[in-house]
């Protein structure tokens, strides 16, 4: 049984509001917790959402603007205060090393946990294991900014009704899984005849950026895409000037990329009501649409059969 969901800790852009904390997003991926863009107040939001420091295995910062990183100091100190027993990797743009160093040692505290800084020097794979491949992709913003993508390997599942049809059971099933073909009662049976391939799940995280190739690359085939939609189309020129997306741009990118669930977030304070974001995105996107709210929990869609 997998446990894969997004816990939204904050949805504001540069200025928090009465109802929106600065950014913060926890992705639960089986036994791992990945915290994206901890803005100011993230520790408190974690408390309200039932998230502890020991849940964190990785912290990923897209860029060093305050609404995406000012909470890093508190989160790092909490990791040490709670004596998190496992290593915690921190990924961030290498060009912002000075800001990471300042935030890491913003005040005095005792270092008790193993923090592993992993600066991102360019687009490419950051980590690869059995559960997922983690990738960074450069985006277009006034400061160095990266989006992140998790891709799970495809999974093959046995079909019980097909195993029964061919009279397969016990050890011979394991042999078939290892060798892809077996013989039973003079009959040659292939793995493809009694199983099916499920496409690995994909998650993408796209924050402050103009439309660029990186957005398209990250969103490609995502089961769950979390993407900034700071402005509406009526402020398109302002979005371009400051390196942001509109709800319509985010929705069009998601539709073109075949995204299943689109999560809009990072809203400007000028929009107390987000009905306009939902309506604008719905004009361009046909899949599941979520306008993120603080403390919401959004499941990663279930796997689909390949093809």
Image (tube, rainbow, N blue to C red):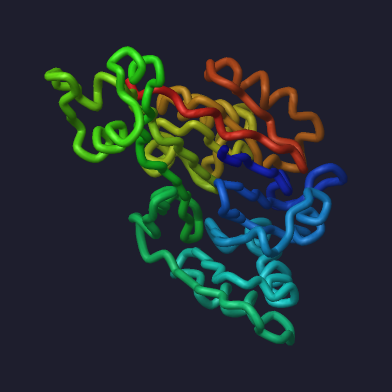
Image quadrant in which you'd find residue 34: bottom right
**26 and 137: which one is in front?**
26
**Which residue corresponds to the image point at 64% horizontal and 30% vertical from the top-left?**
232
Q: Is residue 302 above or below residue 29?
A: above
Q: How many marks?
A: 0
Q: Quadrant of the C terminus?
A: top left
Q: Could you say which is closer to the camera, residue 12 or residue 245?
A: 12
Q: Residue 122: x percent and y percent?
A: 35, 60
Question: x and y percent of residue 171 in the render?
Answer: 31, 36
Q: Nearer the viewer, residue 125 or 112?
A: 112
Residue 261 rendering spot, x and y as whole percentages? 55, 27
Q: Residue furthest top?
A: 165
- Whole-percent x, y for residue 24 in the image: 68, 52
Q: Classify 31 as above or below 83.
A: above
In this view, the residue farthest toward the right is 18
Q: Is residue 157 left or right of residue 68?
A: left
From this view, report whether residue 281 is shown above or below residue 19: above
Can residue 53 be seen here? The reply is yes
Left or right: 93 in relation to 157 = right
Look at the image and tell me whether residue 137 can be seen.
no
The residue located at (63%, 27%) in the rendering is 234
What residue is at 31 percent from the left and 32 percent from the top?
A: 173
Residue visible at 68% across and 57% down? 67
Q: Is residue 195 above or below residue 171?
A: above
Q: Nearer the viewer, residue 208 or 169?
A: 169
Q: Quadrant of the N terminus?
A: top right
């Amino acid at each position: 049984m997998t446990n894969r969901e997004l816990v939204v800790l904050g949805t504001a852009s540069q200025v928090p509001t009465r109802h929106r904390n600065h950014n913060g997003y926890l992705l639960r991926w089986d036994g791992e917790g990945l915290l994206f863009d901890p803005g100011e107040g993230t520790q408190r939001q974690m408390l309200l959402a039932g998230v502890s420091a020991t849940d964190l295995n990785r912290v990923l910062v897209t860029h060093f603007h305050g609404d995406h990183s000012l909470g890093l100091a508190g989160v790092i100190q909490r990791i040490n205060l709670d004596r998190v027993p496992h290593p915690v990797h921190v990924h961030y743009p290498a060009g912002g090393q000075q800001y990471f160093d300042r935030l890491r040692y913003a005040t005095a505290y005792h270092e008790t946990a193993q923090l592993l800084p992993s600066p991102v020097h360019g687009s490419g794979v950051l980590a690869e294991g059995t559960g997922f491949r983690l990738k960074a992709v450069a985006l277009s913003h006034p400061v160095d900014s990266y989006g992140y993508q998790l891709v799970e390997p495809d999974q093959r599942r046995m079909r019980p009704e097909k195993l029964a049809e061919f009279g397969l059971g016990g050890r011979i099933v394991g042999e078939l899984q290892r060798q892809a073909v077996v013989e039973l009662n003079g009959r040659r049976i292939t793995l493809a005849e009694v199983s099916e391939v499920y496409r690995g799940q994909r998650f993408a995280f796209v924050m402050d950026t103009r439309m660029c190739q990186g957005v398209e690359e990250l969103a490609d085939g995502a089961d769950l895409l979390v993407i900034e939609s700071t402005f509406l189309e009526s402020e398109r020129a302002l979005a371009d000037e400051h390196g942001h997306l509109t709800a319509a741009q985010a929705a069009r990118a998601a539709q073109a990329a075949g995204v299943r669930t689109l999560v809009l977030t990072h809203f400007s304070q000028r929009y107390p009501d987000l009905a306009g974001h939902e309506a604008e995105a719905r004009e361009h996107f046909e899949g599941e649409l979520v306008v993120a709210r603080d403390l919401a929990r959004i499941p990663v869609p279930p796997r689909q059969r390949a093809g």
